[in-house]
Image (cartoon, helix red, strand yellow):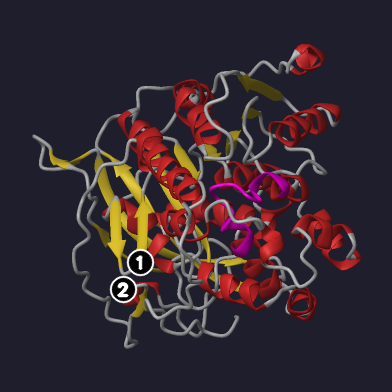
Amino acid sequence: MSPRKTTRSSSTVNIPHLPGPRRTGRLLAASVAAAACLGAVAVPASATTPASTGSEPVVSRGVTIPAFYNPPAQLPSADGSLVRTEPLPLGLSLPGLDGRRIPGTATRLMYKSTDAGGGPVAVTGAYIEPSAAWKGDGPRPLVALASGTMGQGDQCAPSLSLQHPLTIGEGTVSIGYDNIAVYRFLAAGAAVVVTDYAGLGATDRLHTYVNRVDEGHALLDAARAARSVSGASITSASRVGLYGYSQGGGASASAAELHPSYAPDVNLAGAYAGAPPADLAEVMKGIDGSALAGALGWSINGFTQSDPSLKAVVDANTNDVGKAALKDTSTMCVGDAILGHGFTNSKKWTANGKPIADIIAAEPKLQAVLARQRIGDLKPTTPVRVATGVQDDIVGHKQARQLAVDWCRKGANVTYEAVQLPNLGDKILTNHLAPYLTDQGSAISWMTDRLSGKKAASNCWSMPLQP
């Protein structure tokens, strides 16, 4: 395992700047747009009681991470094996007439996975047993949900956002926007398991943001771990669906590709990949200078951790401002990144004053790193649904469409959906977030059909006619 993360606090380096009126307005617009589009519900974060693990909890930007999230020195050998569990109170729930909570009973998880380097990694997450009955065909199914971008600080972990849909610390804001999809699946009677990914929540390492192998493995192993949760009604015979948008779309797409070789024991019925970052070289161009420019820092931090030999390359190509930004972003959630680094051009971080895309183009080692992250080189054996907003200027439409084309050419069963909306504002996240909401009902309906055993009809034949 990687060296343990040190305690994080609000003393993390911040880059001092006074944004001008135009940039302030764009930051405010981006923040308001994100909150409005995601329909977040504010529930104050309360003090948490650390689990009895014999280790001190980590504090990240003023938010105490329960000691439950501190991995042990030794992990089980089998991928998907549970390390520990504890009850997880949902931030939004109601008492049911039968004594069970609505929409379900949640359990916090830590389970074993394998990282991109082939080493063991502890991953945290949550399993929710629904109170609603499953009315589809077959046994109760499971949705393995990969969250969209939350950040790199441990306080941003999706499992924590299920307990606290809105978390505010010392210079940090985290919103559990994917809780919407979680609750919709629970209402349909499907069980849900949510992964925190490697290093997001678990305090022994940084989150390896958009690392396709780490994310794909973590999602598949979450499905395995869910079967062993006490009180879970799902079994190895339960159909499993993979679901994710944005970063989660990339994780779902990667898991669908890796499934035949890594987790054939998971009874996979379908995968939804919304706005998948399949080609990171192209996605980085869209993120640079946008409201989510801070995500460049998360990517660089994660890949440097996975491959320490990259540190010399990164150090040589970043100036003092860039190095401070990388440190700063390592503890940030999405809200923090928008306010702290929104609309930053990466050339302000580089030693030669060129954007990061130019640095990558001139550095074969960096090109090779991104090439290994390409999704679309393997054929998924389960039906897949790829959705992309034609106006998406954060996770570009063209590269997401190309993923569907690549899979179609390999003979995969692909349902492609081009979400056509007007331009809702350049680089302020609205063009990326609006399809998330407008397509969600159709995506959940498609997935519910797969979980019921209904056949999916590929529309690869229509790709030449699709935008």
- Which element is circle 2 on? loop
| Residue at x 41% of width, y 22% of height | 136
Q: Is residue 82 visible?
A: no
Q: Position of residue 460 (x, y in %)?
A: 77, 18
Q: Nearer the viewer, residue 102 or 178?
A: 178
Give the numbered dot on residue 171. Answer: 1
Q: Nearer the viewer, residue 436 or 86?
A: 436
Compared to 75, does 389 lie above or below? above
On screen, residue 64 versus residue 242, left or right, reads left
Judge whether residue 72 can be spotted in this image. yes
For residue 371, side relative to residue 453 (left or right)? right
Tell me whether the residue at label 1 lies in contact with that at label 2, contact meaning CB atoms closer than 8 angstroms: yes
Span shown in magenta:
285-297
Location of mark 2 (residue): 62
Label 1: element kind: loop
Disc on res. 41: none
Give residue 269's position: percent from left, percent from top. Answer: 58, 33
Task: Please tell me whether residue 181 belongs to the stretch shown in magenta.
Answer: no
Query: What residue is shown at x 80% (from left), y 76% (from top)?
Result: 313
Q: Is residue 289 magenta?
A: yes
Relative to 61, residue 228 above or below: above
Find residue 155 and report its horizontal and vertical position in percent: 38, 65
* Residue at left offset 67%, top offset 15%: 457
281 or 188, nearer to the observer: 281
Relative vertical location of residue 123 with respect to residue 388 in this rendering, above or below? below
Q: CA distance from mark 1 to mark 2?
A: 8 Å
Q: Quadrant of residue 335?
A: bottom left
- Amino acid at the residue labelled 1: Gly
Going from N to C along the chain, the mark reached first, 1 or 2, is: 2
> Label 1: how many residues lie within 10 Å, few (<14), some (14-19) or many (20+)?
many
Q: The disc labelled 2 sits on which kind of residue?
A: Gly
- The N terminus is located in which quarter? bottom right
